[in-house]
Amino acid sequence: MRYNYIVPIKIVTADYRALAELRYRILHFLSEGDATASQLGLEPQQYFLLLALRGLPDGAQATIRTLAERLALKHNTTVELIDRLEAHGYVRRRRSPVDRRCVLVRLLPRGEKLLEQVARLRITELRGGGAALVNAIDTVLGRKRQPHGRKRAGNPTKRAVRRNRE
C-alpha cells in the first residue's frame, strides 16, 4: 500500500472527528441505498451484486469468484445470492467456453432494467447530497474545500501541478 501523506505522530481530536464523520456519511449513503433497493423489491445484497456485475472494470470476467471478491463475500454466499437473482430472472449463469470449470454470470434485460431504476435514484440522491460525503473525505485527507461557487485565486496551472504532486 502506498501512502502519499504523512500521518502526524499524534492523532488529535479533529482526526477522530473527521474519521467518525466519514464513517457516518458512508453508512448513511449505504443505508439510503438499501432503502432505495428495498422499495423496488431488491434485497441490498442483490442490488450490490447487480451493480458489481454491471460495473465490472474493463477486462474483468463476471465469475463467481470475481463477484465474491468485489462484494467482500464468501464464495458460497455469492452463489446463494446468484441463485435468488437467477430465480427472479435477473441474471443467468453459464460455463465459460474457454475453461469449463469457470462459471460466468451475466445480467439479463429484466435485471438491467431494475438495476437502472435503482442506480438512477441513487445517482440523483448522491448528486443532491453527496457534497457532505466529499467534504468528509476531504477533511480526513486534510484538504480544505472551497464553498460551492467560489473560485480559488492564483495560477490554474500551478494548482494543477500542485494537485498532481499530492
Image: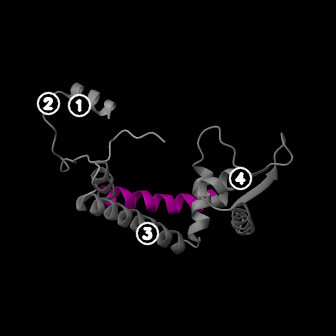
User: In the rendering, which numbered label is found on residue 154?
Assistant: 2
- Main secondary structure found in the magenta portion: helix
The kind of residue tagged 2 is Gly
Instruction: Name the residue carrying label 3.
Output: 32
Residue 122's place in the image compared with 40, above or below, is: above
Q: Position of residue 165 (x, y in %)?
A: 32, 30
**Residue 93 horizontal/vertical position (percent):** 78, 56
Q: Residue furthest right?
A: 100
- Chain part drawn in magenta: 112-131
Looking at numbered disc 4 in the image, what kind of residue is underneath it? Answer: Arg
**In the rendered image, which residue does mark 4 sit on?**
65
* Kind of residue sitting beneath label 1: Arg
Secondary-structure class at tag 1: helix
- At 15% from the left and 44% from the top, the residue drawn is 150
For the C terminus, the quadrant is top left
Image disc number at residue 19: none
Q: Is residue 4 within the magenta segment? A: no
Q: CA distance from mark 2 to mark 3?
A: 39 Å
Q: How far apart are the two marked residues, 3 and 4, measured between alpha carbons?
A: 27 Å
Q: CA distance from mark 4 to mark 1?
A: 42 Å
Sequence-wise, which precedes: disc 3 or disc 4?
Answer: 3
The answer to whether marks 2 and 1 mark residues whose Cβ atoms lie closer than 8 Å is yes
Q: What residue did someone put label 1 on? A: 159
Quarter of image, res 74: bottom right
> Dot 4: within a 10 Å radius of its alpha carbon, few (fewer than 14), some, or many (20 or more) residues?
some
For marks 2 and 4, give the CA distance. 49 Å
At horizontal 28% and vertical 48% (from top left) the residue drawn is 8
